[in-house]
């Protein structure tokens, strides 16, 4: 399973075999069944997680018990509760698998050690966080400026492969619109 | 003007006088009049900007010519168009001053040099980006899960000092709601 990560990384950075071995040596492999949790609200997020296969989603449950999907992650994406991971406080979000999935994980301690000792990996992770910040900024812009219809179209444009793998009510949740509104938009 | 930055930094990290001098030596001071632009759509964002005094806002203009405020930054906050800064592509957003303001800036080249040579500063900037990511995640959650009223209350809770310094129509824009809706909420 490490091969998918190796391929992903070699596509993006020049990294020595020795450093790759270092990264692999502290990597945890995990298989998740559909609906299995990787993280539950109230636990502390202690890992960086790379999706090798499948789909995961991160969501929060509001006071009325309604789910709100913060993000999806498919092959070659990363997912974690950044707030809990960064602060060490309990997570407000849940992460579970929408399909049978395979992930690679590194504990925070090991990950920080890798970043501290492999400069190209440090640069790569920095650029990843920078991109993640940009993606969130764009999502905020989209949320405050666009209609439900525009947001749905943008979702289809940005993630053309995702929409067939995710049930409609989850796309509605991700977009912050009701299922009814999404149905109406799709019928136009 | 560097004193406000020095105070801000010393409050958060242990840093030597020598390193502080390094940071100061490549720091650009800038005064902005109310309504003056720090960045305009179509330019490239080449600086990290720290607000020493005043208020700045970052906003995008949509195809209908409407302004959407992505964020505000007051004293001790940072502001830049992260996408343009990271990618080197032209900015989609504008940054201007809402009051007469004073900022400190570092060019990307100088900033990267500082981060590469001062480990505590590197750690500090990393933690700043991590916090920024968390703040955006929370804003996304708020946007997809909360009513206009809840979002306004959260804004008042999160930024108690901001609401008196910013005109109402700009708060409405930041929250992604109409001025009319905001007026109705405030009358309840």
Image (cartoon, coloured by chain):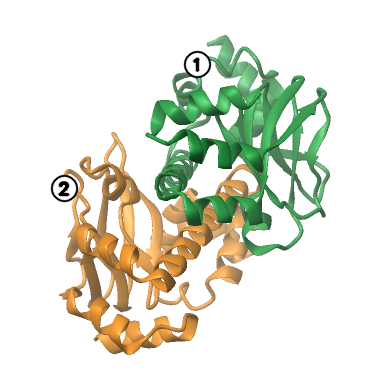
Chain colours: A orange, B green
Side of B66 relative to B2 (left or right): right
- Crowding around mark 1 (Cα neighbors within 10 Å: few <14, some 14 to 19, many 20+) is few
Side of B44 relative to A158 (left or right): right
**Whole-percent x, y for residue A162 in the image:** 46, 73
Q: Secondary structure at mark 2?
A: loop
- Crowding around mark 2 (Cα neighbors within 10 Å: few <14, some 14 to 19, many 20+) is some
**Whole-percent x, y for residue A109 in the image:** 21, 58
Residue marked by disc 2: A43
Q: Secondary structure at mark 1?
A: loop
Q: Chain of mark 1?
A: B
Q: Nearer the viewer, residue A88 or A23?
A: A23
Q: Alpha-carbon distance for marks 2 and 1? A: 30 Å
> Residue at 83% of width from left, 30% of height from top?
B36
Tag shown at residue A173 = none
Where is the N terminus of chain B found, in terms of image quarters? top right
Q: Chain of mark 2?
A: A
**Whole-percent x, y for residue A56 in the image:** 31, 67
The quarter of the picture where residue B158 lies is top left
In this picture, is B121 found above or below A130? above
Q: Nearer the viewer, residue B92 or A140?
A: B92
> Residue at 41% of width from left, 69% of height from top?
A119
In this picture, is A74 found above or below B112? below
**Whole-percent x, y for residue B53 in the image:** 66, 21
Residue marked by disc 1: B160
The quarter of the picture where residue B68 lies is top right
């Amino acid at each position: 399973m490490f091969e998918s990560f190796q391929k992903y990384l070699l596509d993006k950075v020049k990294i020595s075999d020795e450093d790759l071995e270092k990264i692999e040596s502290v990597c945890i492999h995990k298989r998740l069944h559909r609906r299995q949790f990787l993280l539950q609200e109230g636990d502390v997020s202690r890992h960086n997680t790379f999706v090798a296969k499948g789909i995961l989603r991160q969501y929060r449950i509001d006071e009325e018990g309604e789910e709100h999907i913060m993000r999806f992650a498919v092959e070659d994406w990363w997912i974690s509760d950044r707030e809990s991971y960064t602060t060490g406080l309990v997570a407000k979000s849940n992460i579970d698998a929408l399909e049978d999935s395979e992930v690679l994980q590194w504990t925070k301690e090991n990950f920080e050690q890798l970043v501290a000792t492999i400069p190209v990996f440090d640069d790569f992770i920095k650029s990843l966080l920078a991109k993640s910040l940009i993606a969130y900024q764009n999502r905020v812009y989209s949320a405050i400026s666009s209609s439900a219809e525009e947001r749905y179209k943008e979702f289809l444009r940005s993630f053309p492969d995702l929409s067939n793998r995710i049930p409609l009510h989850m796309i509605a949740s991700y977009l912050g619109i009701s299922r009814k509104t999404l149905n109406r938009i799709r019928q136009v």
